[in-house]
Image: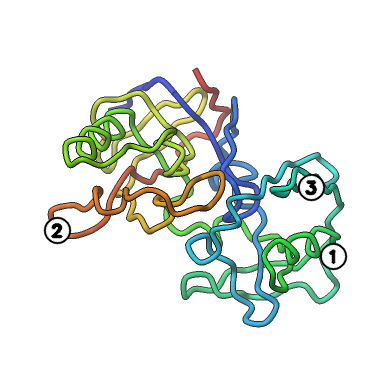
Amino acid sequence: MTTRPRVERLGLALIKGTRHTDRDEIELGEHGPVGDRTWCLVDGATRRVLRTVENPSLLQLVARDLGDRLALTTPDGRTTEATTEDAADGIHVADYWGRGARIRLQDTALSAVLSTHLGREVTLARAERGDVVYADPISIVTTGALRRLSEAMTSRGYAVPPALDARFRATVTVDADEDPGPGDRLQLGEAVVEVGEALERCAVIDLDPLTGERNARLLEHVRSPDGRLLFGFGARVVTPGVVRRA
């Protein structure tokens, strides 16, 4: 069965771990949202891909694609625009959650800006599609699940943070009372996606999506009866196409 839910919100992050920015439309290609996590940051000493849960200040950075270059805005409001080019010896395999991510280190002035912000040496890298994506290429949450989470938090005396859906950094937020199940198909604009398994969550959802400050306690409210921390679901692209926010 294929359903066509209303698309409430769209978003992605060009650089893995940086701020998830709202979009009016996104293109879903064979491997997921075009542009999503195309880039990542690699620790100069350990050759590990940086993860948001360990580097929350990444959320303070906003990246934009200008076609022939990238723009990076830091918390002080300054924007640096720079070109990127694969380094001559830039092809490596970096560690990402214990698995190998194929990356190409970049020659770009942005690495210095990023290193200054993080207080450690990092290099901007271009990742192979999907290699720095933890689970399925698309993540989806429903308005119904967000409402139930809000109600559960309120009933237990917890404050519901503003822009609750932004905490989950979903590719797509859809207007639906219930979550679909594995194997269900959703028509999202021109694209069709097939739903996978529920997504396991980490402490990133407790971080403010703009500042990286740990100022919410969502994680303890998404625990399933079997003890897993689940919210939203993954999906893969069946039919590529453009998705627009309603």
Kindly identify the residue that appears in the image at 55 percent across and 75 percent down: 95
- Residue 118 in picture, x, y percent from top left: 67, 65
In the picture, measured across the screen, residue 129 lies left or right of residue 151, that is right
Rendered position, 208 above or below 186 = below
- At x 33% / y 42%, what residue is drawn? 232
Q: Provide the residue designation for mark 2.
A: 226
Amino acid on which disc 3 is placed = Leu
Q: Is residue 138 above or below residue 55?
A: above
Would residue 61 appear left or right of 141 to someone viewing this image? right
Position in image of residue 240 (x %, y %): 54, 34
69 and 241: which is toward the camera: 69
Residue 88 vertical position relative to residue 201 in the rendered view, above or below: below
Residue ID for mark 3: 70
Residue with the mark numbered 1: 107
Tell me the distance, in whole angstroms, between the alpha carbons under discs 3 and 1: 12 Å
Mark 3 touches mark 1? (CB < 8 Å): no
User: Is tag 3's residue or tag 2's residue first in the polypeptide sequence?
Assistant: 3
Question: Quadrant location of residue 170?
Answer: top left
At label 1, which amino acid type do we have?
Answer: Asp
Viewer-proximal residue, 76 or 232?
76
**Secondary structure category for the residue under label 2:** loop
**Residue 245 placement (x, y as % from top left):** 52, 22
Q: Give the label on residue 34, or none.
A: none
Q: Residue at horizontal 75%, vertical 48%?
A: 72
Closer to the camera in the image, 177 or 158: 158
**Which sits earlier in the primary sequence, circle 2 or circle 1?**
1
Give the amino acid at mark 2: Asp
Could you give the CA–CA distance between mark 2 and mark 1, rounded to whole angstroms?
47 Å
- Estimate how packed mark 1 is, as few (under 14), some (14 to 19) or many (20 or more) residues with alpha carbons within 10 Å: some
Looking at the figure, which quarter contains the N terminus?
Answer: top left
In terms of sequence position, does the residue under pointer 3 or pointer 1 come before the other?
3
